[in-house]
Each structure stands twice: as C-alpha cells, then as structure tokens.
Image (spheres, rainbow, N blue to C red):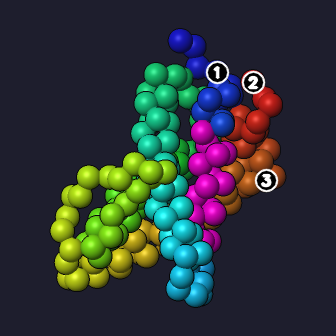
C-alpha cells in the first residue's frame, strides 16, 4: 500500500474520540475526591473505570489498525532527532493508554472492588491488599500526570508544526481531510 499524505478516517476517528475521552477521564479522575460519597459518586467512579477499560480496548484497536495501514511519512526536513522523539512520544502514549487502565483495574481489585464495564464484570487479577492498593494508586496518579504532560507536549509539537514550521503534520490528522 502506498503511503498517504493523511491518516484514514478510522485512524482519525480513533485519535479524536480517544483524545476526548482521555481528557474527560483525567479531569473526572481529579474531581472524584471532591464529590460527596454516595450513589452519584459511585456511579461516576464506575463510569471512570468502564471508560478507562474502553480506552485500553481502543488503544489495542488503534495499534492493530495502524499495523495494517500506512502512516504518513514525517517531513523530510524534520531532523533525525526530532523524528526519533516523535516516534518515542507515540510509543510512550500507547504504553500509557494501556498501562493506566490496567493499573486502574488492579487498583480497584486490590481495594476489594470489582470492575464492571457496562455490566460485564472483569475477572479478578489480584486479591484485596492494602499494600498493593497503595502501589497501584500511586502508579495511577503518576502515570496520569505523565500522560497529561506527554499530551501537552504532543499538542505543542503539532501546533509548532502547524503555526511555526507550516508543514502538514497537524492537517493530516484533522477530520475531513484525505
């Protein structure tokens, strides 16, 4: 398959849907402690868990889709170190999109709570353990901040390419193109 100058519509849809859901999950994750305990909070936490698992599933779908389709080449004018950093950044994004939901599942289970994804209860991987819960909670928070910083860098790089370098990096992922 020849390499296109734009991502296909499936890749774009997955990118933008996941971006929106990840941002919402991050914000909600930071607001949960401010919500009074009760049914509303429990429902928010349940939705946070379910959509976190959905993100992991979509990340696998994205990786699968990406492995079967060509990706647009980086600009020839892009220095090798910048190309390396761009590729490293994408790898880190995928790792975190998989690791954070897995950590969240383990966090819930180590706290003695099952994880339900829209009615489907996930198999228990770890038993209740306060020590593990502490490790997974810290991991979830640290990885969440790492993802936030990486996403800011990702957006900043895309805007730099669009506004300063005036190349096609951002436009090739925009909806309605290609």
Secondary structure beneath label 2: loop
Q: Position of residue 81 (x, y in %)?
A: 49, 50
Q: Which mark is residue 4?
A: 1
Which residues lie in the magenta part?
14-29
Badge nearest the viewer, 3 or 2: 2
Q: Which mark is residue 151?
A: none
Q: Relative to 166, is 138 on the left or the right?
A: left
Please give the name of the residue rendered at 61% of the width and 55% of the height, measured from the top-left corner: 21
- Residue 28, can we see it? yes
Q: Earlier in the sequence, mark 3 or mark 2?
A: 3
The residue labelled by disc 3 is 164
Q: Relative to 122, is 175 on the left or the right?
A: right
* Contact (Cβ within 8 Å) of mark 3 with mark 2: no
Distance from Cα at disc 2 to Cα at disc 1: 8 Å
- Characterize the local packing of mark 3: few (<14), some (14-19) or many (20 or more) Cα atoms within 10 angstroms: few
Badge nearest the viewer, 2 or 1: 2
Please give the name of the residue rendered at 74% of the width and 54% of the height, measured from the top-left corner: 159
* Contact (Cβ within 8 Å) of mark 2 with mark 1: yes
Distance from Cα at disc 3 to Cα at disc 2: 23 Å
Q: Is residue 24 magenta?
A: yes
Q: Is residue 50 magenta?
A: no
Q: Position of residue 52 (x, y in %)?
A: 48, 57
């Amino acid at each position: 398959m020849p390499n296109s100058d734009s991502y296909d519509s499936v890749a774009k849809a997955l990118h933008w849907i996941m971006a929106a859901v990840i941002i919402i999950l991050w914000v909600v994750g930071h607001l949960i402690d401010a919500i009074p305990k009760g049914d509303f909070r429990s429902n928010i936490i349940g939705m946070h868990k379910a959509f976190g698992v959905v993100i992991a599933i979509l990340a696998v779908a994205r990786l699968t889709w990406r492995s079967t389709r060509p990706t647009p080449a980086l600009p020839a004018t892009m220095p090798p170190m910048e190309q390396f950093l761009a590729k490293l950044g994408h790898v880190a994004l995928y790792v975190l999109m998989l690791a954070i939901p897995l950590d969240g599942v383990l966090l819930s289970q180590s706290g003695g709570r099952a994880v339900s994804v829209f009615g489907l209860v996930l198999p228990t991987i770890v038993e209740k353990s306060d020590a593990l819960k502490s490790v997974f909670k810290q991991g979830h928070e640290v990885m969440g901040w790492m993802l936030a910083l990486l996403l800011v860098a990702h957006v900043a790089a895309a805007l730099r390419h669009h506004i300063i370098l005036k190349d096609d990096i951002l436009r090739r992922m925009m909806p309605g193109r290609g």
